[in-house]
Amino acid sequence: MRLFAAVLPPAVAVDELAAEVRELKQLPGADGLRWTEPAGWHFTLAFMGEVPEETVPGLSERLARAAHRTEPFPLALHGGGRFGDRALWAGASGRLDVLRRLAERADAAARKAGIDMDRHRGYTPHLTLARSRAAAVDLRPFVAALDGFEGGPWTVGELSLVRSHLPRGGITGQRPRYEEVGRWPFGGAG
Ligand code: 2AM
């Protein structure tokens, strides 16, 4: 099954961002983008790709340990950015250092569970809002519009393992469906 570890924002944060995204969708070019659904919004920590069923218990055990070693930390949705003209995303503020450490721990957990992880080129905390369709859309005005966006902070207290169900037959416009298959609380501070 296709899996990734993630931090899921709480409903209040999702609602704030959804209101912001409604504004973004009024901008020229918005129709040329494939927007992600609020119900699936997440900050990816480590993408594992296809993982055999028998690997999941060991992976879960190691992710539980990674979570236990992490202290709860504040995070807020903040501004945005883009990956070239391919993807538009919302960024974060708060303890990005702890988020980054958590991403490293999730990556290490997956490796120790025997999953062949890509060598990552630096971790960019991001929540993907839209991807371009075939024709490139200039994403700069969208990033500029997100510039002043600051959601309310929340305390991240758990790590999630999410399964991605890809759309059948790659039908254009269809999005993957995400299903949380595991969740582990962080350990105490320190
Ligand atoms: P993205 O949002 O930047 O596309 C589920 O696919 C999540 O895993 C997405 O948030 C996606 O990031 C992330 N991811 C990281 N590497 C990936 C890869 N090689 N293929 C698909 N998704 C990947």
Image: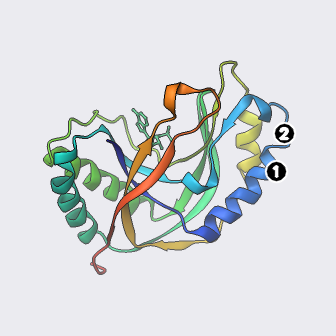
> Mark 1 sits on what residue?
23
Q: Which residue is mark 2?
A: 27
* Image location (x, y in percent) of residue 93: 55, 61
**Which image quadrant for residue 121?**
top left
Give the left or right position of residue 54, taking residue 80 as reference: left
To which quarter of the image does residue 12 belong? bottom right
Mark 1 element type: helix
Query: Local crowd at mark 2 within 10 Å, few (<14), some, or many (≥20)?
Result: few
- What is the secondary structure assignment of the residue under circle 2? loop
| Contact (Cβ within 8 Å) of mark 2 with mark 1 | yes
Residue at horizontal 57 percent and vertical 38 percent from the top: 175
Q: Is residue 95 left or right of residue 88?
A: left
Q: Callout 1, which amino acid?
A: Glu
Distance Cα–Cα, label 2 vs label 1 = 7 Å
Quadrant in the picture for residue 84: top right
Residue count near mark 1 (Cα–Cα under 10 Å), binned few <14, some 14–19, many ≥20: few
Q: Is residue 150 visible?
A: no
Whole-percent x and y of residue 164? 43, 44
Q: Of the residues shown, which amino acid type is indicated by label 2? A: Leu
Any atom of ligand 1 within 8 Å of the CB at mark 1?
no
Which one is nearer the viewer's eye here, 131 or 88?
Answer: 131
Which residue is located at x 50 percent, y 31 percent?
168
